[in-house]
Amino acid sequence: MTSVNTNYGALVALQSLNQTTMELGQVQNRVNTGLKVASAKDNGAVFAIAEGQRSRVASLGAVMDGMDRASSVIDVGLSAGEAVGDILKQLKEKSVAAQATDLSTDQRDALQADFDALRNQVDQIVNAATFNGSNLVNGTNKTGTSNEFTVMTTDGAGTAGGTYTMAGAAFATNGPFSASATLDDATGLTIAAGSKLQFEITAGNETTTFTVDMAGTDTISEFVDSVASQSNGRVTASYDDTTGVISYSASEAFKVLMVDSAGDGVDEDGFFDKTTDDTGATMTASPGGGGGGANQLTVSGFDFRLGVSGQALAGVTNSLSLSSAASAETASTAIDTALTALNKDLATLGAQSKAVDVQKSFLGKLSDSIEAGIGNLVDADLAEGIGPPASSAS
C-alpha cells in the first residue's frame, strides 16, 4: 500500500541506520578504551566482577606499600644494630689492650677516654634509628608491649585458617615473671641440655620442621626472640608479663612438640596449651581471626641502649672501667656477652626482614595474576577484531 502519511521503507532504513550508528559507537568506544566492558550497561555481571577484583588489586597495593614501610623500619634497625656491633668490637679492642700490666696511668686514662667516647655513641645511634615514627632498637616498639610493631601481610579476611595461634599455659609457681627471668625460674621445670621445641609448619602440601634450641638459663625474652629467628620468621612468639603466657602465631598451620636431647616428648606446660595430661603430646595451633579482616606479622623489637635489663647491652654500663688489668678483663667479658646477644637479635631481625620480602614478592605476583584475570573479562581482543557487542545482563 502506498501512503502519503506513512513511509514504511524510510522507517526501516532509519532503524537500520540507528543500529549501525550504535554499533559504530560501540566499536569506536572499544578502540578508544581497549575494553569490551567499559561500563555496567555493556555487561552488568562482568562489570561487577571486574570492579570487585579491581578493589582487591587496590587493597593489595596498599598492603605492599605498608610492607615497603615495614622493610624500611627493619632495615634502619638492622643498620643501627650493625653500627652498635662495630662499636662493641672497638670497645673489645680497647678492653683487651687495657689488660696489659705494663701500662702507665696516663696510658690507661687515654684508653678509658676512648672507651667512654665510643660507648656513649651507642644510645645516640639507636635513638636515631627511627623510620616513619617507628624504632625497633631503642625500646619504642619492643615485643610484648602495647606498641609492638606489626605489619599487614595480606588483605585476606580473618577467617578460619587465616591466622593460626597458640597460647601457652601461664608460667607456674609465683605467677607472671619479667621477660628477663630465666625459663627454669619461670616455669619451675628442669630444662635439660639438648631440650628443644619443634615447630612443624604446613603450607599447602609441604611440611617443614624447625627446631628451636633452648636452655634453662635462657631468659623468656631470649626464648621468644629465638622462636622467630630459628623458624625464619614463619612463627613469632610474644610474652605477656601481666598474665605470664607465651603466645605463638603464624599465617600457616603449625604444630608444636617439646622434646629432650634424645628426641622424646617431655612436659609441655608453660610453652603451649596443655590440652592433655599426656607428656610429649604434639599440640596443634588453632585457626582464628586475622584481626580486623587482615593478617599481620609481629616484628620483634629490641632495646640496644646501654644497660637496659634483659636486653643485649644490659652489662655494658658506665661502671665498666679500664683502670686495671682485672677491671679491663671484666669489661671484655661484658662486651663478649653483649656481642653474642646482639648478634642473636640481629639474626631475628634479618629473618623477619626476609619473611616480609618473600610475602611482598608473593603479593606482587598475586596482584599481577588478578590484573590478568580482569583483562580476560573486560579487555577487547583487538588482534582478532572487535567482534559482536557484548550482551547485556538480563
Image (cartoon, rainbow, N blue to C red):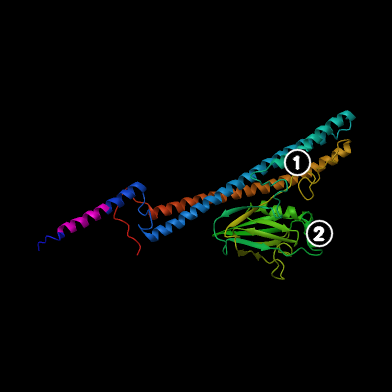
Three-letter amino acid code of the residue under disc 1 = Asp
Q: Earlier in the sequence, mark 2 or mark 1?
A: 1
Q: Can you say whether 382 is above or below 170 in the image?
A: above
| Disc number placed over residue 185 in the picture, else none | 2
Which marked residue is nearer to the observer: mark 2 or mark 1?
1
In the picture, measured across the screen, residue 185 lies left or right of residue 197, that is right
Find the magenta span and give its range: 9-21
Looking at the picture, how far across and down is residue 12, in whole percent? 18, 58
Q: Quadrant of the C terminus?
A: bottom left
| Disc number placed over residue 123 in the picture, else none | 1
Q: Quadrant of residue 119?
A: top right
Q: Quadrant of the N terminus?
A: bottom left
Find out whether residue 13 is within the magenta segment: yes
Q: Quadrant of residue 115?
A: top right
Q: Can you say whether 265 is above or below 359 in the image?
A: below
Q: Can you say whether 350 is above or below 91 in the image?
A: below
Of 231 and 365, nearer the camera is 365
Element under disc 1: helix
Of 2 and 20, nearer the camera is 2
Dot 2 alpha-carbon crowd within 10 angstroms: few under 14, some 14 to 19, many 20 or more: some
Looking at the picture, how far across and down is residue 289, in whole percent? 60, 63
Three-letter amino acid code of the residue under disc 2 = Asp
